[in-house]
Image (tube, grey):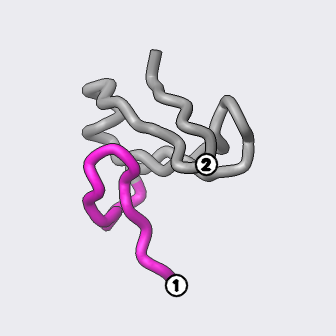
Amino acid sequence: MADVFCLSCKKKITNLSVTRFMCPECGKYEIVRCKSCRENAVKYTCPKCGFTGPN
């Protein structure tokens, strides 16, 4: 299984407290975020289309 990293903080995901969803703008890239970044509303940018969230 390939390593999974948080798109916001770039840390390796090591537990199940993760959120995965397709980019709300282009739908072509899976956004993966750790619990800490999600709770603190740390921004992320889709590498496919440049969409920035959360907003």
Tell me what residue is drawn at x 45 percent, y 38 percent: 45
Residue 33 vs 12, above or below: the answer is: above
Write the residue at 32% across / 25% down. 41
Residue 2 horizontal/vertical position (percent)? 49, 81
**40 on left or right of 17:** left
CB atoms at circles 1 and 2 under 8 Å apart? no
Give the residue number, with chain letter if any, for mark 1: 1
Span colored in magenta = 1-16
Mark 2 neighbour class, 10 Å CA radius: few under 14, some 14 to 19, many 20 or more: few
State the residue at coordinates (49%, 45%). Answer: 19
| Residue that appears at 26% across and 26% down | 40
- Please tell me whether mark 2 sits on a helix, a strand or a loop: loop
- The amino acid at mark 1 is Met
In the image, residue 22 lies at what x, y percent?
66, 44
Mark 2 lies on residue: 48
Judge whether residue 45 is colored magenta: no
Query: As rendered, which of 49 and 44 lies closer to the eye?
Result: 49
Disc 1 residue crowd, few under 14, some 14–19, many 20+, Cα 10 Å: few
Earlier sequence position, callout 1 versus callout 2: 1
Q: CA distance from mark 1 to mark 2?
A: 23 Å
Q: Is residue 36 left or right of residue 13?
A: left
46 or 35, nearer to the observer: 46
In the displayed orientation, state which residue is furthest to the bottom.
1
Residue projecting furthest to the top: 55
Name the amino acid type tagged 2: Lys
